[in-house]
Image: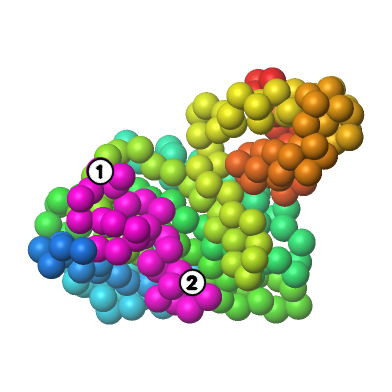
Amino acid sequence: MKLKELLEKGVEIFAHENNPDFEHGILTSKNIVPFRIYSFIYNCITARIDFVSPEIQTVLGYEPEDFTIEFLFEIIHPEDKEKFIAHETRALEFCRELPTELQDQYYIVHDFRLKTSSGAYVRILQQAFASEMVDGNLVKTKVIHSDISHVKNQSDSQLHFIGLEGQPSYYNVMSEEHPFSEKEKEILAMMVQGLTSEAIAQKLNRSIHTVRNHRKNILQKSGCINVQDLLVKATKEGWV
């Protein structure tokens, strides 16, 4: 996926549903301010930022050399810090669960508010993806920050794991409520009980194909990599 496509897909996720100027992922009004972005490279080995693009001056008003991990956390809105930490922690867990060959097949998306040099806050869409792998290990991550204040202005923040090259995506993986439909919840309960897809299909008088599709959707919505993790999480979170 090209960088431009990645940016557009990420921004579309967070577009305000009631924004009349946002239709099918395309900003249709000429009055909408273009997305302002900057990027930086995070070194996973040193836990430091190696490079910050000069566009940060336009978006936040800071000099690139002043933008460090410590400074980033300092300018996060106080109300967003707890969720920011939770999202970053969950994203790290997700990446650690991924097989080596899939480490560069996902990008992590969530949003939060940052304070500009003027003291005002802007809502930033953060998209992070692997930029350098060595012997199957993630060495550097490219992080893109887009100002989406004019697209999304509500305060709730969501975390998504977006799959590339045909990999499944996991949306709103840390929703406080379970994301399943009633039928999916019913099937999940049977899965926790140890029933196979064939047994579930017979019990619900549904085709095996339908049950397998439900199971696939349940796994995707849960944010889990495999069924074993799903069953553990479902029990722990009280989804069944």
Residue visible at 59% across and 54% down in the picture: 169
Separation of residues labelled 2 and 1 (CA atoms): 31 Å
Q: Give the quadrant of residue 37.
A: bottom left
Residue 129 image point, x, y percent: 54, 67
Instruction: Identify whether 121 is placed above or below 30.
Output: above
- Check disc 2 and report its element: helix, strand or loop: strand
Query: Which residues lie in the magenta part?
Result: 1-27
87 relative to 197 in the view: left or right: left
- What numbered label is drawn on residue 142? 2
- Check disc 1 and report its element: helix, strand or loop: loop
- What numbered label is drawn on residue 18? 1
Q: Nearer the viewer, residue 118 or 236?
A: 236
Query: Can the viewer see residue 122?
Result: no
Labelled pair 2, 1 in contact (Cβ < 8 Å): no
Q: Give the quadrant of residue 196.
A: top right
Q: Nearer the viewer, residue 137 or 183?
A: 183
Residue 74 painted magenta? no
Neighbours of disc 2 within 10 Å: few (<14), some (14-19), many (20+): some
Residue flagged by tag 2: what amino acid is it?
A: Lys
Q: Nearer the viewer, residue 198 or 21?
A: 198
